[in-house]
Image (tube, helix red, strand yellow):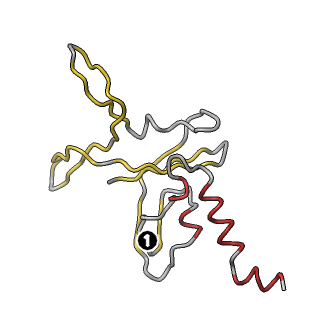
Amino acid sequence: MKTAMFNCKRCKIGKRIEYPEYRRYHVGYGRYQGESFRLGEVVNVGFGRMEPRKISPSDDALCPSCGKSMTWDWLQAFEVKDVPCDARCTGARGHTCECSCAGKNHGAGWQIGQPLSGLVTALSNARQSPLLQQERT
């Protein structure tokens, strides 16, 4: 699975979509490359053949709120065991993850169908912070 992180600079909205990797092929000198897309609705491709439509990250790059094009890139994750995964990671819109989750939770609040859950998670974690509780008393 490859994960694409989308970012709308106008609306400040992020989006995270995972794409299965298909058809890995050799490109030379021990390197391999694959196509990553997800399968959409079944369409007629001609002569009575029905196939699922391939949806690539470029097809998914429209902002759900303003309809403009979003910037996107593949998630680059590095595992750093000393840095705990927290709300900064789950609500992130960037393309790089450097914490203990190694990209598994990066931008998880921006999964398809949950556009504001990353912000809600970050706010609820901030309200439960021990530092904030001390300031209130």
Foreground: 2 or 52? 52
Q: Amino acid at mark 1?
A: Cys
Foreground: 50 or 24? 50
Q: Is residue 25 left or right of residue 69?
A: left
What residue is at 17 percent from the left and 45 percent from the top? 25
What residue is at 43 percent from the left and 80 percent from the top? 81
Give the class, few, some or many, for how many residues have Cα within 10 Å of label 1's Cα (few <14, many ≥20): many
Judged from the image, the secondary structure of the residue bearing numbered disc 1 is loop
Q: Is residue 112 left or right of residue 135?
A: left
Please state the horizontal and vertical placement of residue 130, each as a whole percent of the image. 70, 84
Foreground: 91 or 42? 42
What residue is at 58 percent from the left and 38 percent from the top? 64
Q: Residue furthest top?
A: 47
Please state the horizontal and vertical placement of residue 40, each as a whole percent of the image. 36, 34
Please state the horizontal and vertical placement of residue 3, each as a whole percent of the image. 40, 53
Q: Is residue 29 left or right of residue 67?
A: left
Quadrant where the N terminus is found in the figure: bottom left
Instruction: Name the residue tied to disc 1.
Output: 101
Quadrant where the C terminus is found in the figure: bottom right
Q: Is residue 119 left or right of residue 134?
A: left
